[in-house]
Image (tube, helix red, strand yellow):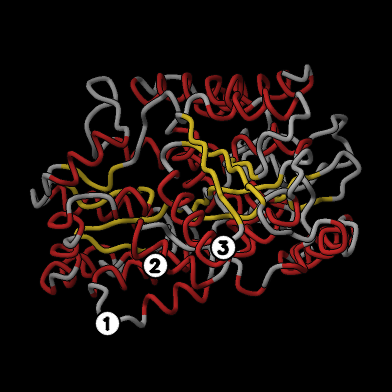
Amino acid sequence: MRRSALLAIAVILVIVIAVVGWLALHMAPSANQRLVIVTYSDVEPVVQLAAEEFEASHPDVKVVVVPFPWNSYVQNELTVLEAHSPQYDVVTFTPTSSQLLAPYLVPLNMSYFNQSDIIWDQEAFGGVYELSNGSAEVIGVAIQTWVELLAYNATLFNNVTLQQEFYSEYHVQLNPWTWQNWTAVIDADKFLVGKGLVKYGFLVEDEPSHELIDTYPAIFEWYYAHNSTLDCGSPAGLPGYGTMFMGCAPSWWRHPFPPPSFNSTAGVDALEVLRELVSYEPSPSDIAIGYDTLAQLVGEGSVAGAIAWANDIMGLNSSVASQLLMAPLPGGYGEPGSTFLGISKYSQHKGLALEFLRFVLSPQFQEQAFYLQGSLPISRQAYFEIMSNSSVPAYEREWLKAILIANENATATPPTVPQTYPYLIPSFNGPVFSWLQSPTQDPGQLLASIAAQWVRYLSEGG
């Protein structure tokens, strides 16, 4: 089944599952209400901005924002929700925590939002929850987007002489926008590092505590989407499982979850690409590349570019960031990661909470959040409005073109099932990181062993 058909079915399922009209009929906001939003500290400025703007247009409403540190906010939310407490009206979550919180969130009828303006690939990764009966429901809306793509050194890649030399040698343009596979990225590394123009090629984050579970799917997605047996026509995989699992359950499979997909020739190809890319950066035996190290090396100007989150690149010093351009990952896709807001089932102000969510998704607020907080929109219209604003630096407008395309094709999705953090991530990252340090084990055997552990963890319920 094609992706467009799957998305259409998903939207229909969401509307059918939601009790049509119940939010409007039974939860209409009234005057002198207090709306409490719980969030985490990193996104607090954006949520606080939304709270202040919402209060300005709703004089009889007081919005209270309650922030917690990133490493404790989910547990705080779960404690309150599991007690069926009405303490929080609007709850913040990310894709990795979405399935933990889903049972306590109100299913949203998406007909109350402008669906055509929402970037669905970002919304679906975390905002859509698959039920045990195979249907799906929307449990939250994205207040901002994160996306992983290519950032590259504009000075090098816009050099006409280098462009001609690269094309003559590799018969590929030295332009990431034209790259159709990961071989081109490796060739660029070989060319630029070989000439001594940079010390390192395209950096990839190989730090084992978390980053590898983002980096590998970013590469593996190309192979997954080009293998119909693995993706089953769904290039982003199934909700909760993502591309590290097959996009369907074959008839021979006897488990209630799809089979892992990376224990395949496609998975091995992606792992070999990761190994080659890592060979053009500091050895993982010496230093693992996480965000801080990546930012430092990019800032020193000693790299060809990076496979990185656009939001992190935008957060670099402007003198550094302005020397970089962005492009989608080879073949025109990205890796998603949004921040979501959902409505607690135990809120006594659900109508007001819905009104707040609709306000947050408005192109006007999404645009304002970009200008004031650097928050990347979930609204297509907001992108177009910002890109047409001549007061925005030209390089930022160029960034947004790449970010929008990567967002609209954000199909490289790691798993988000509840077992992901405690079990799946360490059982993948640890062995892969060790292999990158000393790639002596057969990569197929390595991935098969990890996949077998994943099946065991999911079969045992974590």
Q: Which residue is drawn at 42% across and 33% down?
A: 211
Coordinates of residue 258 in the picture (x, y in percent): 77, 37
* Residue 421 occupies quadrant: top right
- Looking at the rendered image, the disc whose residue lies closer to the viewer, 2 or 3, is 3
Task: Classify mark 2: residues with Cα within 10 Å, few (<14), some (14-19) or many (20+).
Answer: many
Give the alpha-carbon distance from disc 1 to disc 2, as whole Å: 18 Å
Q: Which residue is drawn at 19% across and 46% down?
A: 298
Coordinates of residue 117 in the picture (x, y in percent): 60, 73
Coordinates of residue 332 in the picture (x, y in percent): 47, 65
When the figure is inspected, residue 290 is found, relative to residue 110, above or below; the finding is above
Coordinates of residue 355 in the picture (x, y in percent): 67, 61
Q: Is residue 163 visible?
A: yes
Give the alpha-carbon distance from disc 2 to disc 3, as whole Å: 39 Å
Please name the amino acid that badge 2 sits on. Answer: Ala
The disc, 1 or 2, on the residue closer to the chain's N-terminal end is 1
Regarding mark 3 in the picture, which secondary structure is present there? Answer: loop
Pick the residue in front: 223 or 16. 16
The disc, 3 or 1, on the residue closer to the chain's N-terminal end is 3
Q: Residue 402 carries which label?
A: 2
When the figure is inspected, residue 245 is found, relative to residue 366, above or below; the finding is above
**Residue pointed to by mark 3:** 59
**Residue pointed to by mark 1:** 390
